[in-house]
Image (cartoon, rainbow, N blue to C red):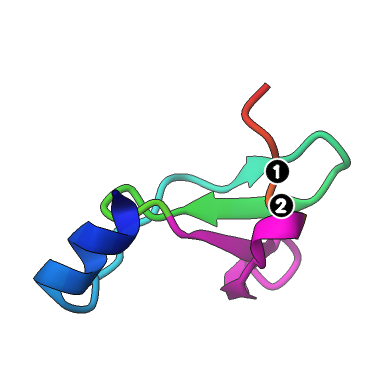
Amino acid sequence: MKFLRRLLNGPCSHRFSWPRVGAYGQHYQVCIRCGMVFAYDWELMRRTGPLPAEKQPSET
């Protein structure tokens, strides 16, 4: 569904959640519009790039 929405609406103008910490200590942010997950560098206080699906934290 996210893919179809992204295809029909064009590129997302991302709006991000507050940085979160995954189960293994990695920091990340989630776009609240499209759901893309981005790595976050806590020391530099910025996003470093999108995370591939296999490295995304689980919602448990």
Per the rendering, the mark at residue 33 is: none
Question: Label 1 neighbourhood size at 10 Å, few (<14), some (14-19), many (20+)?
Answer: some
Per the rendering, the mark at residue 57 is: 1
Residue 38: image quadrant is bottom right
Q: Position of residue 43 (x, y in %)?
A: 76, 66
- What residue is rendered at 70% in x and 43% in y? 57
53 versus 19 height, above or below:
below
- What residue is rendered at 88% in x and 41% in y? 24
Q: Are marks 2 and 1 in contact (CB under 8 Å)?
A: no
Q: Which residue in the rendered view is the most extreme toward the left?
A: 9
Give the camera-side residue of 56 and 22. Answer: 56
Residue marked by disc 2: 27
Q: Position of residue 55 (x, y in %)?
A: 76, 57
Q: How many marks?
A: 2
State yes or no: residue 49 in magenta. Answer: yes
State yes or no: residue 40 in magenta. Answer: yes
Question: Label 2 neighbourhood size at 10 Å, few (<14), some (14-19), many (20+)?
Answer: some
Q: Which residue in the rendered view is the most extreme toward the top?
A: 60
Mark nearer the N terminus (2 vs 1) = 2
Give the left or right position of residue 34, taking residue 25 as reference: left
Give the camera-side residue of 26 and 41. Answer: 26
Report the amino acid beneath label 2.
His
Q: Position of residue 14 (x, y in %)?
A: 30, 66
Report the amino acid beneath label 1.
Pro
- What residue is rendered at 47% in x and 45% in y? 18
Closest to the camera, between mark 2 and mark 1, is 1
Q: Label 2, label 1: how many angstroms apart (C-alpha)?
A: 9 Å
**Numbered range of the magenta stretch:** 36-54
Q: Secondary structure at mark 1?
A: loop
Classify the position of the C terminus by image quarter. top right
